[in-house]
Image: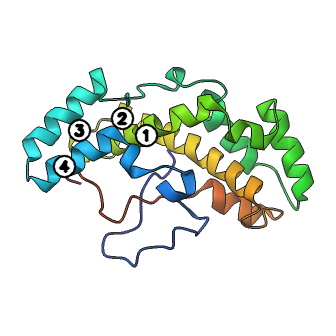
Amino acid sequence: MHDTSTQPHGAARPDQSDYRYISLNSLGLDPEQLDFYQLLLACRARGEAGESLRQVMRFRTDGYGKARFISSLDALPPPLATFPLWRAELDGWPGELAREELFTRASGLLGQPVGTFLASAGWRAALPDIWQSLLVLGWRQAGSPADAALAAQLTDVLRVVHFLQVLEGDRVALTGHGARRDVLGAQLLWPAEGMPLPR
């Protein structure tokens, strides 16, 4: 199972521009637009742990506001459901590859240019749901082996998108296999205020 951990508690907070991490900022998400996340932050601010748990359970079945829980990869628009498999394929590309070759290969998998996919309405609409679903799945007290498996899959979806974003933005050279592996193994970096749920 893939690692879905964040930075260690008490460790220096990584720079959000570090391509080895996936943050709200790198994904282009505005925390104020994440309905369920804002609800949990409000519960935590009021010290309402019990209400947080009730909202988590309710979110899994009913969603909240514009947000909905992603219970399986099948709930995602194509081609997102295939991204966990693509992560292994991307990681298996050996040796040195020019940026142009990486674009050609990635666009071939997507069936469209990388930039077109990243700007697509389907992906942009699914992104907040994926992130907020991972937020819920990250609560160990509510977890199960099935939840851990789903969290690994959704994390790999974000890792593949992160790879595409880094490639499109030319944020770091991905010509070497080591750099590509680092990006494809990026860890989720939760906001500075931390997780609004007990860990």
What SS does tag 4 mark?
A: helix
Question: What residue is rendered at 76% in x and 53% in y?
Answer: 168
Question: Which residue position is annotated with label 3?
Answer: 142
The Cα atoms of the two marked residues, 2 and 1, are separated by 6 Å
**Of the residues under marks 4 and 2, which one precedes in the sequence?**
4
Question: Which residue position is annotated with label 2?
Answer: 147
**Of the residues under marks 2 and 3, which one precedes in the sequence?**
3
Horizontal relation, residue 165 to residue 173: left or right? left
Q: Are marks 4 and 1 in contact (CB under 8 Å)?
A: no
The numbered mark at residue 42 is 4
Most distant residue in the front direction: 32
Task: Give residue 142's position: percent from left, percent from top.
Answer: 23, 38
The amino acid at mark 4 is Ala
Pick the quarter of the image with the C terminus.
bottom left
**Of the residues under marks 3 and 1, which one precedes in the sequence?**
3
What SS does tag 1 mark?
A: helix
For the residue carrying disc 4, how many other residues have a C-alpha within 10 Å: few (<14), some (14-19), or many (20+)?
some
The amino acid at mark 2 is Asp
The Cα atoms of the two marked residues, 2 and 3, are separated by 9 Å
Q: Are marks 3 and 1 in contact (CB under 8 Å)?
A: no
The amino acid at mark 1 is Ala
Q: Are marks 4 and 2 in contact (CB under 8 Å)?
A: no
The numbered mark at residue 151 is 1
Task: Give residue 105's position: percent from left, percent from top.
Answer: 86, 42
Q: Are marks 2 and 1 in contact (CB under 8 Å)?
A: yes
Give the quadrant of residue 157.
top right
